[in-house]
Image: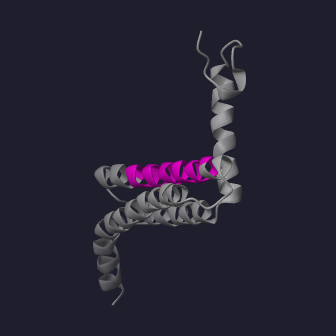
């Protein structure tokens, strides 16, 4: 019978709570180890504060939450790819470099998209707010 965890080979399946605790452990590990994840989290806090301040619409919240969730998830995947590559080889290998670069490229591309989305949501509101202060 297949199990739910890499830690339980051939044993009884892990509980749902254990599965969630493993996921939470992975998230905490990335936050502690990866500067870029901490940058993404800081941006998340700033954007969330702005969203409340400007009272963005439900649709804008949906876009914002998808962007935030996608960005943080992609950073988790990128970090896990980096770990697996490092686990497989300590030597320089062009394919290892490509795997790491491609994963980082995916994060970078999505980061650009999220900046565009944020600009589309917040720029008009910021301009309007600045015009009111005149």
Percent x, y of residue 110: 39, 59
- Is residue 75 one of those drawn in magenta? yes
The x, y position of residue 95, in whole percent, is 50, 55
Tell me if residue 91 comes above or below residue 3 in the rendering: below
In this view, the residue in front, 28 or 59, is 28
- Left-right relation of 58 to 84: left
Q: Residue at x 53, y 53 (%)?
A: 78
In the image: residue 24, left or right of residue 102: right
Q: Is residue 45 magenta?
A: no
Magenta-tinted stretch: 65-84
Q: Give 82 or 97, whichever is nearer the viewer.
A: 97
| Residue at x 67% of width, y 34% of height | 22
Quadrant for the C terminus in the image: bottom left
Residue 3 in percent (x, y) is at 62, 17
Residue 52 to residue 12: above or below: below
Residue 19 vertical placement versus 48 (above, below): above
Q: Quadrant of residue 91?
A: bottom right
Q: Quadrant of the N terminus?
A: top right
């Amino acid at each position: 019978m297949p199990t739910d965890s890499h830690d339980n080979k051939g044993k009884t399946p892990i509980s749902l709570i254990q599965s969630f605790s493993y996921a939470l452990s992975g998230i905490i590990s990335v936050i502690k180890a990866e500067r870029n994840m901490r940058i993404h989290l800081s941006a998340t806090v700033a954007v969330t504060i702005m969203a409340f301040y400007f009272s963005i619409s439900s649709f804008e919240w949906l876009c914002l939450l998808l962007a935030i969730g996608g960005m943080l998830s992609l950073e988790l995947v990128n970090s896990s790819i980096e770990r697996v590559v490092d686990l497989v080889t300590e030597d320089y290998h062009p394919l290892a470099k490509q795997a790491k670069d491609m994963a980082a490229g995916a994060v970078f591309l999505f980061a650009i998209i999220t900046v565009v989305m944020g600009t589309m949501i917040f720029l008009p509101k910021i301009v309007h707010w600045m015009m009111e202060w005149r």
